[in-house]
Image (cartoon, helix red, strand yellow):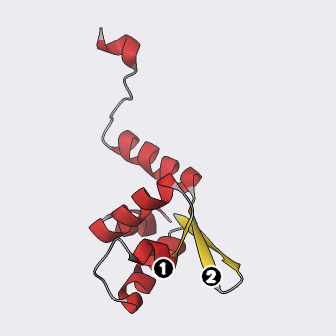
Amino acid sequence: MATKVYKALSDPTRRKILQLLRERDMNAGEISEYFDSTKPTLSRHFSVLQEADLIQGNRQGNFIIYRLNVTVLEEAMWAMMDMFKLEHRGNDDEK
């Protein structure tokens, strides 16, 4: 699973999609307004993100509403920090 997550995160378009979904849930049409990509290209990006379980899509009428799966994203970030032995530093540590 980690390989799929890191592959999904390696693409700047997919990272931008995640950034947009961090703000609010959106349908494909709303997301596409931020890109010059074709619908099939964006659909492929959505598929990669869903396969990595970084986003979930739920059908509501004629639309699929995408939402960020924060848990998987957080787990990937913690795993990466562990891999590079990075520590989270809060404000108390910066004094």
> Is residue 82 toward the left or the right of residue 68 in the image?
left
Badge 1 crowding class, 10 Å Cα cut-off, few under 14, some 14 to 19, many 20 or more, is few
Residue, x 49% and y 80% (percent of image)?
47
Q: Secondary structure at mark 2?
A: strand
Residue pictured at 50% horizontal, 78% vertical: 28
- From the viewer's side, name the closer residue of 41 and 34: 34
Instruction: Give the image location of residue 42, x and y in percent.
Output: 40, 82
- Chain-order first, disc 2 or disc 1: 1
Would you say the residues marked 2 and 1 are in contact, meaning their CB atoms lie under 8 Å apart?
Answer: yes
Corner quadrant of residue 10: bottom left
Instruction: Provide the residue designation for mark 2.
Output: 63
Disc 2 crowd, CA 10 A, few/some/many (<14, 14-19, 20+): few
Residue in the picture at 57% in, 62% down? 25
* Outermost residue to the top: 95
Name which quarter of the figure residue 35 lies in: bottom left
Q: Quick one: SS at disc 1?
A: helix
- Outermost residue on the right side: it is 61
Q: Is residue 78 above or below residue 33?
A: above
In the depicted view, which residue is nearer to us: 80 or 9?
9
Please state which amino acid type lies under the numbered disc 2. Phe
Residue annotated with mark 1: 29
**Residue visible at 50% across and 69% down in the picture:** 52
Q: How much space separates mark 2 and mark 1, taking CA atoms?
A: 9 Å
In which quarter of the view is residue 37 placed?
A: bottom left
Where is residue 63 shown, x and y percent of the image? 62, 82
Q: Quadrant of the C terminus?
A: top left
